[in-house]
Image (cartoon, rainbow, N blue to C red):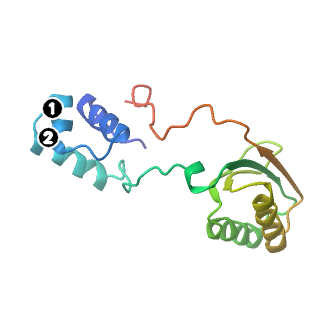
């Protein structure tokens, strides 16, 4: 069940999503409150799990991770043991930025960041050596058109 947030909570979340390094004074000024109530709201949202760990966004290309692949996986295996091994394999691979189980013809989609096609092949060979997979299709992203970590707070359930 979604947490019940009021307009000030949403404004605070919007500010934190845009730049979590802002001081409490700056956030309080932008949302029309004072420092202590803003701090208390942030603390309550952390305790409720609305706010997770604070991280930084690192530019993958500046680190030499220039290739982004979306990997579509179909499997003929659906037993719990296979799934446990598959999920453990994905979690152990730092190249896997995201992994989703899907409804439909494709069972899983992965977002994989690597330096180049050769590095992707190394990842692919390691993956198929660890887990039995029926079919793998890799799609190379030619251009990232939009990237955000900010959730649309104005359309979230109230």
Q: Do the residues bearing badges 2 and 1 touch, measured as CB atoms within 8 Å?
A: yes
Residue 112 horizontal/vertical position (percent): 68, 54
Disc 2 packing (10 Å; few <14; some 14–19; many ≥20): some
User: In front: 114, or 14?
Assistant: 114
User: In front: 9, or 3?
Assistant: 9
Q: Is residue 151 above or below residue 130?
A: above
- Is 133 displayed left or right of 56 in the figure? right
Q: Residue at x 17, y 47 (%)?
A: 39
- According to the picture, the residue beneath numbered tag 2 turns out to be 25
- Is 113 displayed left or right of 53 in the figure? right
Residue 139 horizontal/vertical position (percent): 79, 44
- Is 62 displayed left or right of 158 in the figure? right
- Is 135 displayed left or right of 57 in the figure? right
Q: Quadrant of the N terminus?
A: top left
User: In front: 98, or 124?
Assistant: 124
- Callout count: 2
Q: Residue at x 36, y 37 (%)?
A: 18
Q: Which SS class for mark 1? A: helix
Disc 1 packing (10 Å; few <14; some 14–19; many ≥20): few
- According to the picture, the residue beneath numbered tag 1 turns out to be 29
Q: Is residue 8 above or below residue 1?
A: above
Q: Which SS class for mark 2? A: helix
Q: Is residue 11 above or below residue 113?
A: above
């Amino acid at each position: 069940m979604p947490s019940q947030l009021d307009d000030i909570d949403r404004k605070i979340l919007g500010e934190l999503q845009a730049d979590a390094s802002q001081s409490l004074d700056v956030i309080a000024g932008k949302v029309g409150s004072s420092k202590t109530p803003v701090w208390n709201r942030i603390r309550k949202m952390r305790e409720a799990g609305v706010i997770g760990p604070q991280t930084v966004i690192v530019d993958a290309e500046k680190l030499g991770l220039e290739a982004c692949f979306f990997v579509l996986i179909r499997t003929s295996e659906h037993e719990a043991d296979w799934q446990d091994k598959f999920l453990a394999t994905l979690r152990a691979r730092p190249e896997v930025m995201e992994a989703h189980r899907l409804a439909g013809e494709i069972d899983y989609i992965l977002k994989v960041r690597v330096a180049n096609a050769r590095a992707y092949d190394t990842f692919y060979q390691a993956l198929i050596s660890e887990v039995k997979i029926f079919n793998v299709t890799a799609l190379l992203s030619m251009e990232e058109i939009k990237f955000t970590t900010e959730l649309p707070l104005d359309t979230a359930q109230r």
